[in-house]
Amino acid sequence: AQSVAQPEDQVNVAEGNPLTVKCTYSVSGNPYLFWYVQYPNRGLQFLLKYITGDNLVKGSYGFEAEFNKSQTSFHLKKPSALVSDSALYFCAVRAARSNDYKLSFGAGTTVTVRA
Amino acid sequence: NAGVTQTPKFQVLKTGQSMTLQCAQDMNHEYMSWYRQDPGMGLRLIHYSVGAGITDQGEVPNGYNVSRSTTEDFPLRLLSAAPSQTSVYFCASARGNEQFFGPGTRLTVL
């Protein structure tokens, strides 16, 4: 079975400060890892993914994430948060098998960036 | 190229009513899936399909039926709606490492 844990329901930061959203995962074999963002009353928007290669992945809107295999983590980071980054963030994992697309999502972390 | 489309956007049902949530994609993806999103629980997989004529259950399939007669369409049927099925439903299609989500259907069962 595969699963994702996002240990923080909420993250609050001041604008201009670094933002980190934590994610740990469990999967059989190698993982494919994803971050999605959801703004109020909207669908899911893809931010970034880790498939293979460099452990530091850069994505949309200045976000990046670091894959750490030994700690089974894939934390999302942004060096300088904006008020517009306030949203619900989901981490997701799937097994790195070509015929298995099933994603498992974390419960989500609500990010609030105050001006 | 419309991507993944879902209809309706909003729906209110009474307990016991039936309805079908529609999902279509124009990217010729073999894999399609349905998720439900509930507060504090993330997205949970309901059913999925790896191609026309092939469907399988996900994590929370009870109360839902699916069929896949064409590559493009993957409807989700609620045969007898229950208040526990109040949720936001997302359809997705995938190819390779990319998964594409529809805009969602917000369903309320009274």
Image (cartoon, coloured by chain):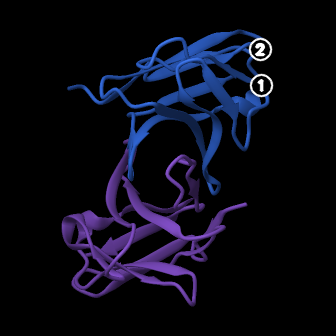
Label 2 sits on a secondary structure element that is loop
Q: Amino acid at mark 1?
A: Gly
On the question of residue B8 being in view, the answer is no
The amino acid type, in three-letter code, at marker 2 is: Ser
Q: Chain of mark 2?
A: B
The residue located at (22%, 64%) in the rendering is A60
Are circles 1 and 2 on residues that touch, CB within 8 Å?
Answer: yes
Q: At 61% from the left edge and 16% from the top edge, which residue is drawn?
A: B67
- Mark number, residue B106: none
Q: Nearer the viewer, residue B109 or B80?
A: B80
Chain B representation colour: blue
Q: Position of residue B88 (x, y in %)?
A: 55, 36
Name the residue that disc number 1 marks.
Answer: B63
Taking depth in this image into account, of A56 and A45 the one nearest to the observer is: A56
Image quadrant containing the C terminus of chain A: bottom left
Asked whether, in this view, residue A99 is left or right of residue B38, the answer is left
Of callouts 1 and 2, which one flags the residue occurring earlier in the amino acid sequence? 1
What is the drawing colour of chain A? purple
Mark carried by residue B80 = 2
Task: Return the chain for callout 1.
Answer: B
- Residue B24 appears at what percent x and percent y? 40, 20
* Position above or below: A1 against B72: below
Question: Residue A91 location in percent, x, y?
Answer: 49, 64
Q: Is residue B3 visible?
A: yes
Left or right of B74 in this view: B39: right
Disc 1: CA contacts within 10 A as few (<14), some (14-19) or many (>=20) = some
